[in-house]
Image (cartoon, rainbow, N blue to C red):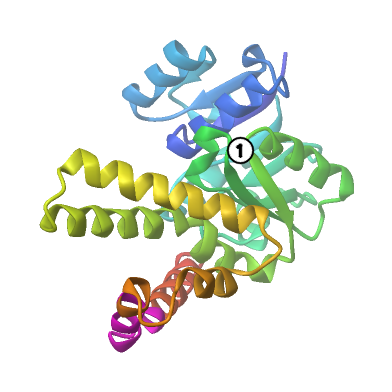
Amino acid sequence: MGHELGIVGAGNMAEAIARSVIAGGVIRKEEIVAADVSAGRREVFAKQIGVRAVEKNEEAARGARTILLSVKPQQMKEVLSGIGSLLSADTLIVSIAAGISSGFIEKNLGGGKAWRVIRAMPNTPMLMGKGMVALARGRNAGEADLARARSIFEAGATVLELNEEKMDAVTAMSGSGPAYFFYLVEQMIRAGVTLGLSQQEAQVLAARTCIGAAAMLEGSQEGAAELRKKVTSPGGTTQAAIELMVSKQMGEILVASIRRAAERSRELGT
C-alpha cells in the first residue's frame, strides 16, 4: 500500500511542514512516512508527531503520492539517484532545497520520465503557522500539481506562486530572512542591556516592539518607508538613531548581505 506524503530528510523545516498539514487536516499522520539518517530526528517524528519514521530514504519514497525533498543541497544528487527508480511518473516531487533547480532534480532522478517537480522555499515561522512560502513549477508540473503543493504549505504559511528564476531571490529574502530579523533583535537586546535594562526586560521590549511594528506593516496601506517616516520626528530620538545608521551605511550593508545570500543560493545549485 502507498502513502500520501514521503518526507526525505526529516529536519526542522520538514517537521514544521508535517505538523502543519496534520494540524490543518490536510494529510493524516498515518499517511506520512519520514526518512532521516539521524535517530534523534526519527524519534521526534515518531514520538512527538506520530508518523512512521524510517532510516532509509527508499522506504519513504516507495509508494508515495508526493515526495518532499528536504535534504541539504550538497546531498541532493546522491539522494535523487537512490530513489528515482522507486517513483512513478505520477509522483509529485516537491523540493525545499536552496539553490537546487527543478531541472537538476529531473535530470538526477533519471529514468526518462517527465518528472513533475515543484520547487518551494518555505521559512521557519511555519512552526508558528506564520510562514511564507514561494512555489515555482518545473517544466512538466501542471496546475493540479501546483494546487496540491499549495495545499501542503497553506496549512502553515502564506503562499506565493512565481517563476523559478526568482527563487534565489526568495531564498535570500524570506528563506534566510528570519535570521536577519533575529540578528536585529539580538542587537536591540544587547543595546538595552548596555543602557541598564535587564536581559529579560530588554528581550520583552525588543520582541514586542518588533511584533507590533510587523502588525502595523501588514495591516497598513502604507509602505515601510512611509511608516518609518511617521515614527521619525524631526530633531527627535528616532532621527538621531536613523542618521547614525545611514552614516554607517546600514542600508547598503543589508542590501549587500541579501544579495550575497542570493548568490550563495545560485552557487549551491551548481
Relative placement, left or right, of 213 versus 252 is: right
Relative placement, left or right, of 23 versus 195 is: right
Identify the residue at horizontal 44%, vertical 14% (top origin).
48
Q: Is residue 246 magenta?
A: yes
Q: Secondary structure at mark 1?
A: strand
Instruction: Find the magenta span and give its range.
Output: 241-253
Would residue 199 be seen by someone viewing this image from the given angle? yes
Magenta: main secondary structure equals helix
Examine the rendered structure and indicate whether residue 171 appears above or below residue 251.
above
Count the labels in the image: 1
What amino acid type should be assigned to the residue bearing mark 1? Leu
Identify the residue at horizontal 79%, vertical 41% (top origin).
89
Examine the rendered structure and indicate whether residue 8 appears above or below residue 24.
below
Q: Which residue is mark 1?
A: 68
Identify the residue at horizontal 14%, vertical 58% (top origin).
195
State the residue in front, 157 or 144.
157
Residue 169 locus on image (x, y percent): 57, 69
Q: Is residue 156 magenta?
A: no
